[in-house]
Structure formats: C-alpha cells, structure tokens
Amino acid sequence: MAKRIISFVTVFMIAVFCFCTVASATADSLPGSFSGGTKGLMFIKRPETLSASTSDKTYTISASVKEGCVVKVYRKNASGGYDVIHQNGAALVSKVGASGFYSVSVVLNEGDNNLMVTADAGNGVVQEEKITIKRIGRSTLDKLSQITLNLFSMFR
Amino acid sequence: MVERFKSLVLALLVITSFVLTFKIALNEKLWPDGYNFFVDSRFSSVADLASKLNPFAKSGTGNASNSVLTVPNRVIVNAGGEQRYYITNKNSQHDAVDYQVKRILTALFSSLDVGIAADDAEVASALKTKSVYLDYITSYDTGVFAQYMNKNDSTVARSVSKFSGMIVSFSDTVKTNATVYIKDIQTNRYFKFDIPYAKADFDTIFKNIQNDEENLISYSADLGYDKKVEGQRILIESAVPIFLEPVEVNEIKGENPVLKANNEYDDNVIYKILRTFKINPNTYNKYTEADETMVFVENNATLKIHKNGVVEYNAKPGVPGIELVKQNASSFETMLAVSEFIDAVSKSAGIYHPLMQSPAYNDGVLRGADMQMRFDYLVNNTAVMINLSGGKSNPEVDNSVFVQVQSGAITKYIHLLRRYDNTENKVDTALVDKSLDAVFEQYRGNNADGIFISNIYPVYKYDDKTETFIAQWNINVDKVEINESEPSQE
C-alpha cells in the first residue's frame, strides 16, 4: 500500500512539474535555465549568429516563424531569470500571421543585452533562442573608426 | 521738325500696336472666364499658333512634366547603422536633401562613367553606412529619364536600361566622389557609378538631421527577408525599406470638378474640357445618356463626360485622334507631349496635383510615337490609387489617367478628374507585417506556396463605396509560386 502511495505521489509530482514547465512557456517570467526543447518553429534571421554589436539605441530582431505561433521577447534580469520586455507600455508579445515574418525593435541598454526569444505553438510546444546584443558607446566606436581611418591612410 | 516729330509718334504707335496685339493674342489673363467678346478667340487656332511661335511660352512646366517626373517619390537618409530618416515635408532637412538630390542626379546623368557591376551584398552594406535611398516606385526607361534631365546621351543608359530607384553612398575617406548604385530591372543586376560630388555638402545634412526624430526603418536585406529558409513563404527584394512602425499621413478628400454644389454639371468646366480636346462647340452633336453621361460626337471621335468625373475620349477606328507629335517622334517627345496634354486637361478642371507614371503598370508600351501609359496623381507625395468598377456606361478605371497614342495621335484617353485636398485629420497606415499577412492570405487562397515582393510603399487607395481615401501599404507582388498538388479554393 505504502509503495502504491509513493508511486502515486511520484507520478503526481512529475505531472505537476511537467504542467508547471508547460505553463511557464507562456509566462512573462522564465527561469534562466529555461529550454523549450523544440526546434523548427522559428528561424532567427537577425542577428545571423545570435550575437551582435551595435552603437545604435535600438536593435531590430527578425525571424521567420511558423504561422500562429506566439512570439515573446525577454530580457535577462539581475537574478538570472528572464522577464518579458515592455516598451511604450506594451509587452513584446505578438502572434505571427500568414506571412511568417516577425520583426521587433528592442531598446538597448549600454553593454551586453542578454535577450531570449520564444515561439510558442501551444500545447507546450515551444522553441527558445538566446541572443546577446552588445551596445557599444559612441566614443568607443569613434575611437575604433579613427584607428581604421589611420590604418587606411597608412596604406594609401 | 514737326514732320519728324509726327513720324516718331506714328512709329511709336505702330510699335505699341504690335506689342499690344502680341500680348492680347497670348496672355490669357487679359480675359476673364465669363462671357465677353474675346472669350472664343483664346482657344482659336490663331492663338494656338501664336502660342507655339511665342519664344517665351512656358513648355514642360506642367504637372507631369520633366521637373516633377525626376523627383523621387520616396527619400530615406541613412545616417549609419539603424539611424534612418524618411524625408517628408515635416523633416527639417527636406529642402536641403531635395536640393542635393537634384545635384546628384545632374552629376550622375552628366557623368561619362560606364557602370561597373556590383552585387547585392555591396548594396546592402551601402544602406548600412551613410547613404541616401531614392525610390521612384515606378520604373523608368533610363534613356527617357536622362532626357528629362536634359541629357540626350547618358552613359548610365548603356548599363541600365530600366530602373525604379537608386542608392547614393558616401565614403568616409573619399571626399570628392559619391557612388550611385542602380539596379537594372530588366537584368536584375546592380551597377555602380562613381560621380564627382563634394561629400561635405551632404555632411551638413547628416549632422543637422540628428536633431530630427529617427524612423524605425530596416531594409529587407537587414532583416534577412531577401533570403529564403525552410518554411518561409515570402521573399522581399533586398533594398526594399520595411517601416517597422505605422507611417502617419494626412487624410485626404476628393472633389469632383465637373459637378457644381447642386450636383449639376459645371458648364464652365465642361466648356474648357471640350476646348482641350479640340472639340468645336459649333460643330459637335451632343446627347445625354440615361445615367446623365454627356456625350459629344464629332466626325472623328466621341468624348464622354461621366457624372462621376471620368472623361473618356475614343477616336473612331482608322482615323487619327488628337495629333500630338510627328509619326517619327522619339519616346521622350511623345512622353513630354502626353504630359502636357494631361496637364491641360487637369488645368481645365482646376486640378494642379503632380502626376507620376503608375507603378502598377510598369509594362506600359513606349515606342517612339506609339505609347500606352497610365498615370496616378500624387497628393502629399503619395500616389492615389484608383479602382472604379465599370458600369453599363461607365468605363472601368484603374488609374487616374490612361492614354493610348498611335502614330503620334491620342486615340484613347480616360481621366478621372478629382481635386484633392487635405482634411484636418491625420491617419496611420497599418503595420507592414500585418499588410504582408493580408497579402499572403489572398494568394494562399489561390494555392500560392510563396510570393516575391519587389516593393512596399504607402498609397492612398480610393474606396468607391464610401468615397474615401484610405492610407495603406501597396505591396508589389512580382512572382508567385503555385502549389500544383492543392485544389484551388476558388
């Protein structure tokens, strides 16, 4: 009898764990270790290598996504988890239409911007991609371009 | 002494009479629109002839004339990275950009440089650096365009036969030249031209424009929308700008100029239109159809003025219509004469909006003195797209103006007359992504697996049910991939 109870409790706990994992796929906050475990729902087109540098205040992420998927963009918080980004009073959450195109401009902080994009097809079928966008300060970029210019002049 | 004085006075009087006769014959402002003794002579063949002989008569300054046709429909200043500015009247640098663009175009079509082939990646890179994107949204024959720029023999036309836009790129290191990238839409290949241009002139614009509000614009190549991955249904030409936010435009309204406020025909406007079509008020037969369309029949042609403002001219088969140019005229001469004729019709109805060749019909015929072209009005530098379904008497109208010229004479002409004006309201276009969804939904209904888009730009679309003009994205679909295994849903 005791074995049966233990088995029942174990099964119940596994079921609850699975339910929580599925439910958390659509949540606005996710743990840092979150993994959707699915592939083929979304292809990130920009950035091409899942990491990029820019001096711009915003960065446009683009993707080709399966129609009907809900795409969310998260930013890594101080405790290592991810929170859905809110811009201009609205969460970066969007349902992808027939074109399959998804693009969003994310406002960047100085330094590394650790982002996560999820595509949720429902019923717990989720794909996630982690992206890092480094925002370089204007002064750093000016120094870099100065070096490039000097090098260019040397070879003329 | 007295005799000499008399001779001098007589000579002065004779000269004065000649000068006044000349002015009276040519200057329309001497006569008001209302009834008076001279009202008919203004349109007489003598006046026409005198006008042609007048060396000071304005030519090519009409609405659809070369000065307007060479102005790009859309200009985007790329200040580097994602810093991009869509140039409209609201932009502080509008006039400065306009002036510099004219200089660049003049330098380009005066240049003796022959184009060098360039690839898409080079163009995509130019769009990320300091550059200017010029979009005509319609395609131009390069040789004819060069003639609009008063350049008869341009080397640009040797590399590029037809184009619809260009990208002007400025190097950080080369201060005296700019590079212009143009895609030949016949061969789908880019060519670049180095033109003499002092970059410092545009540097001031790049500096001052930083004070304006940036626009969220990415080009298709930036977003990877020009490269297909598995499951992707839409491909977009690499240099097409994708606006990532709605674009605000003025709401417009249209007034039918052939009708007065009481819904009756305006005789004054009708009279002027007849004169423009060289229909003699003393010789035509006139009758009114059941739907109140006015029909004027002459020996060689029929002119209908419909109550919805559509003017429809049809020459009888086998007879010359309205002669515009000689049979051996060049395409440029024909285009210019057609532009001036359209301007004359527009002005007879008090319409002063510029026109552009319709982007929806890039395959228009243009061969010397034979042509078939369509034009749309530009209001707030945005094309007005018309689609009126035809009726028993009314013709179907897809563009504001349709012209058919055969052997230098107009044989068919359809013109929707409208005076456009801004209302006090501003309206936003939809998001481009949502418009792309709607377009693909339409094609999917016909078993399309994929589509190729060559341009996306804002237009005013006329809704004839509500008689309103809706600001929306016009999406040019060039190629469609059909899934042959699926039965059609239609």
Image: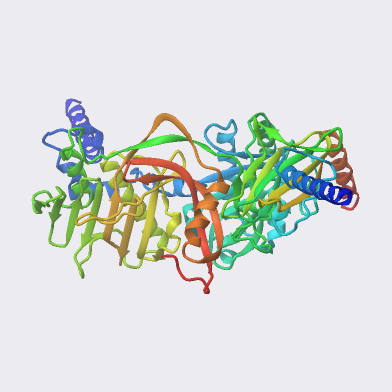
Look at the image and tell me whether residue B72 can be seen: yes
Q: Nearer the viewer, residue B337 or B112?
A: B337
Residue shown at the point (37%, 56%) measured from the top left: B374
Which colour style is shown? rainbow
Residue B81 visible in rendering:
no
Q: Say above or below: B405 vs B202.
A: below
Viewer-proximal residue among B153 and B316: B316
Nearer to me, B140 or B389: B389
- The residue nearer to you, when weighing B80 against B444, is B444
Image position of A71 (left or right of B135): right
Query: Residue B439: x percent and y percent?
Result: 50, 55
Residue that lies at the very extreme toward the bottom in this rendered image: B485
Residue A100: x percent and y percent? 61, 54
Identity of the residue drawn at 14% across and 42% down: B40
Query: How far across and down, in percent of the image, does residue B177 sit?
Result: 70, 49
Quarter of the view holding residue B82: top right
Q: Residue furthest top?
A: B2
- Image position of B441 with respect to B254: above or below: below
- Residue placed farthest to the front in the image? A1
Q: B312 above or below A92?
A: below
Report the label total: 0
Position of residue A111 measured from the top left corner of the image (x, y, whole percent): 85, 36
